[in-house]
């Protein structure tokens, strides 16, 4: 979309964000699996150019970022390091599907690149994350103050409440918490990420 619409999309996004000063930027990111209709393969370079422009805009406007990443963690890691984010803005990996090693690498990002990983959050949803047997171990490894609950569902037929309740139970089990504690911690984390405190 970004390349097809020319450079006007950047000005349009900037104007929309100006009209909504509490809005996050995203969901943005890279997808190493999705092939746009009518094309022969993943458009990695085009995706990366648009993603890095969006990320730079988030840093410029000091907005939190909701990150989409599928089979492109190395590339996203490099872009974060290049852009200086999340040193400057919080980043939330939505429906995080990375392994524990990538989680550890993201949390250890050093100054000179993004920072110490202190502003990186990791969300989990039943719709996406429960397909993988590694999810519970990854959730257990996420620092308590960086874990988020999400549904990754939309539309009138989506049973968002049931999905959230299911994932809340999984997070509670993985972290050794009660469901009440999981709800309290993930709510506090979301409020901090979106600067609602």
Image (cartoon, rainbow, N blue to C red):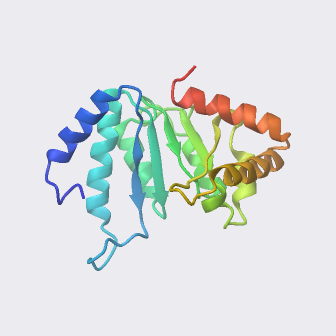
Who's the residue at 75% across and 56% down the image?
Answer: 136
Above-or-below relation of 125 to 39: above
Left or right, residue 44 beside residue 150: left
Furthest-top residue in this view: 197
Left or right, residue 8 beside residue 149: left
Quadrant (top left, top right, bottom left, bottom right) of the C terminus: top right
Who's the residue at 85% across and 43% down the image?
Answer: 176
From the top left corner, tell me how far across and down residue 122 is, in percent: 60, 44
Who's the residue at 42% across and 62% down the image?
Answer: 31
Above-or-below relation of 121 to 154: above
Left or right, residue 159 beside residue 67: right
Q: Which residue is nearer to you in this view: 111 or 149? A: 149
Above-or-below relation of 159 to 25: below
From the top left corner, tell me how far across and down residue 70 is, in percent: 48, 62
Quadrant (top left, top right, bottom left, bottom right) of the N terminus: bottom left
From the top left corner, tell me how far across and down residue 51 is, in percent: 32, 50
From the top left corner, tell me how far across and down residue 171 is, in percent: 75, 48
Who's the residue at 72% across and 52% down the image?
Answer: 167
Which quadrant of the figure has residue 159? bottom right
Could you tell me how many numbered marks the image carries?
A: 0
Q: Which residue is nearer to you in this view: 49 or 11? A: 11
Left or right, residue 48 beside residue 76: left
């Amino acid at each position: 979309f970004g390349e097809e619409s020319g450079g006007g999309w950047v000005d349009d996004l900037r104007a929309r964000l100006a009209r909504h000063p509490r809005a996050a930027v995203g969901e943005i990111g890279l997808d190493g699996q999705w092939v746009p209709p009518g094309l022969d393969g993943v458009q990695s370079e085009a995706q990366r150019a648009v993603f890095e422009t969006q990320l730079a805009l988030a840093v410029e406007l000091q907005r939190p970022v909701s990150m989409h990443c599928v089979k492109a963690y190395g590339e996203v890691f490099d872009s974060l390091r290049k852009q200086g984010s999340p040193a400057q803005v919080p980043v939330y990996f939505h429906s995080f599907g990375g392994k524990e090693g990538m989680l550890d690498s993201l949390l250890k990002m050093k100054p000179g690149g993004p920072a110490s990983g202190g502003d990186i959050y990791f969300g989990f949803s039943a719709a996406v994350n429960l397909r993988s047997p590694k999810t519970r171990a990854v959730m257990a490894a996420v620092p308590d103050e960086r874990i988020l609950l999400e549904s990754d569902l939309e539309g009138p037929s989506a049973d968002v409440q049931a999905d959230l309740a299911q994932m809340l139970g999984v997070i509670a089990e993985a972290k050794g918490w009660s469901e009440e504690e999981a709800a309290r911690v993930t709510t506090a984390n979301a409020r901090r990420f979106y600067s609602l405190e």
